[in-house]
Structures are given as C-alpha cells and as structure tokens.
C-alpha cells in the first residue's frame, strides 16, 4: 500500500507560497485531471476526453496524483501521476507497457514506480514549481523505498519529422542506456536518426527527467491515437534521493 500522502501534506512540504501533497479528495483529483486537459489537449492538441474536459484514462483511478498548490489561490498548478508496481494488480500493467516491451527493465531486482502525465500550468513554468514537484517525488521514493522510476515521456509530433529526428539524435547520443537496459517500442516511430541539429528544444518534463539522471532506453514509440511519440526513460532512485535529501531529511 502507498501511504506517503500524510507525510507530503505536513508542514515540511509547505514552502511558503506552495504546498506539495498527494490529492486525496475527489475534487482535488478532478482539478489535476483538468490541469492535464488544459496542457495536453489545449496546448498540445490532444483530442482526448474533450466533452468532460478531463485528461483521464483507465490507469488514473489506481494512481496517486501528486500536486503542487498555490497557497494564495488554492489552485493546483502542477501535477504528476504515480503508479507503484504493487498497484498494477489493478491495472494489469504499467502504462509504459502499452507502448513498449519492457521486461528487461521490470525484471531487475527492486521496487518500481511509474511517473506519468507530468505538467505545469503555463503561468508557473519559470519558477520553483517543477522543483517542488520533484521534491515531492523524491520524498515518496524515499518513504516507499522505490529503487527505480520509469516514465513514458510524450513528445508532440506537431513540429514535424525534422524536430523529432533531431531530438532522438541528441537523446540517443547523450543519454542512451546500455544494452541490458533497453526496451522495444511496440509501434516504432519510423524516422532516420541522423545529426540534423544538436540545438534542439526539449519539453519541460523531458528536460526534468534528464536532469535527474534519466537514461533513454530505446527508440521512440508512436501513439497514433494521440499523435505523439513516446520515449521510455529509466531513473535510478538513489541519485534522486541524494539530490533532494537536504530538502526533507534535515527537516523531518
């Protein structure tokens, strides 16, 4: 079971203007899903649950939803959903397994948690909100003794083949996992990975994963329904805990 929410809601994660916590009330979860809709449907053009104006799939009811709240307005300004390996008894698999064959990864010893649908409200992307979200993730990793984080990072294809080609060239050159930690895309994105440009703009979530020491574990997978490319990344939790330890160990 996943009981980290009571720790996240305590004062050590109230950072003056913002509070980081696990959503517990139905209205809080709904606000997280609405924020995701604002980012992924309106900004990216994903046509997903447009009628309800919620970004939701079959995994969400079994995930924990981490949120950052602006204390001055009570508004949820960032969110990420978390699925621990012990909870996939309800979902049948990690979300990433709908896009990749990942048996090499999840057969490694240790406890896994999947991060997904991470987003930050457009008005809060230049401040500390993303860092606070990662502090919350690090806290959960520490409390729940997670060994590895996995994520399926979505990249919109609206910028064209040249962009995704350049991005994959940079990722596979600089952040590629060793052979024993590779995954196989179920629907490969058929592009030729050539050195088009090293100066390529990355999305905020992708940059955040790479800053945590994430490895890119294979070629991209194509999600035709949403019109995005998905990239599987793997993070060693010891690096994340070491980076954020001073934010919660010394305050506990």
Image (cartoon, rainbow, N blue to C red):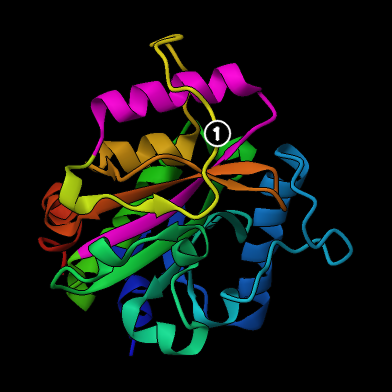
- Quadrant holding the C terminus: bottom left
Is residue 70 located in the magenta-colored stretch of the structure?
no
- Quadrant holding the N terminus: bottom left
- Residue 77, percent across and down? 57, 51
Mark 1 crowdedness (10 Å alpha carbons): few <14, some 14-19, many ≥20: few
- Residue 12, percent across and down? 27, 65
The residue located at (42%, 15%) in the rendering is 194
Instruction: Tally the marks.
Output: 1
Residue furthest right in the image: 51
Is residue 156 located in the magenta-colored stretch of the structure?
yes
**For the residue labelled by badge 1, is the local secondary structure a helix, a strand or a loop?**
loop
* Region of the chain picked out in magenta, as a range: 148-176
The residue located at (30%, 45%) in the rendering is 217
Image position of 113 with respect to 250: above or below: below
Q: Is any part of residue 139 visible from this angle? A: no
| Image quadrant assignment for residue 137 | bottom left
- Residue 165, percent across and down? 50, 22
86 and 128: which is toward the camera:
86
- Residue 132, percent across and down? 37, 50
**What residue is disc 1 on?**
190
Q: Is any part of residue 191 visible from this angle? A: yes
| Image quadrant assignment for residue 151 | bottom left
Image position of 30 with respect to 162: above or below: below
The residue located at (69%, 43%) in the rendering is 227
The residue located at (80%, 63%) in the rendering is 49
Residue 170 horizontal side relative to residue 26, left or right = left
């Amino acid at each position: 079971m996943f009981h980290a929410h009571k720790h996240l809601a305590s004062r050590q994660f109230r950072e003056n203007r913002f509070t980081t916590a696990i959503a517990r009330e139905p209205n809080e979860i709904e606000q997280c899903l609405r924020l995701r809709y604002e980012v992924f449907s309106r900004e990216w053009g994903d046509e997903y649950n447009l009628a309800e104006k919620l970004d939701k799939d079959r995994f969400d009811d079994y995930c924990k939803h981490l949120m950052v709240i602006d204390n001055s307005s009570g508004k949820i300004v960032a969110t990420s959903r978390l699925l621990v390996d012990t909870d996939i008894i309800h979902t049948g698999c990690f979300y990433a397994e709908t896009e990749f064959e990942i048996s090499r990864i999840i057969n490694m010893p240790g406890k896994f948690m999947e991060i997904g649908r991470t987003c930050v409200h457009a008005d809060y992307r230049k401040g500390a909100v993303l860092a606070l979200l990662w502090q919350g993730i690090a806290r959960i990793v520490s409390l729940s003794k997670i060994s590895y984080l996995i994520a399926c990072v979505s990249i919109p294809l609206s910028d064209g083949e040249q962009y995704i080609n350049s991005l994959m060239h940079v990722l596979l050159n600089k952040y590629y996992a060793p052979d024993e930690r590779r995954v196989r895309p179920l629907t490969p994105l058929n592009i030729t990975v050539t050195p088009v440009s090293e100066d390529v703009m990355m999305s905020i979530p992708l940059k955040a994963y790479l800053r945590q020491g994430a490895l890119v574990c294979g070629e991209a997978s194509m999600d035709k329904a949403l019109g995005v490319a998905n990239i599987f990344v793997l993070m060693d939790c010891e690096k994340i805990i070491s980076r954020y330890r001073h934010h919660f160990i010394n305050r506990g």
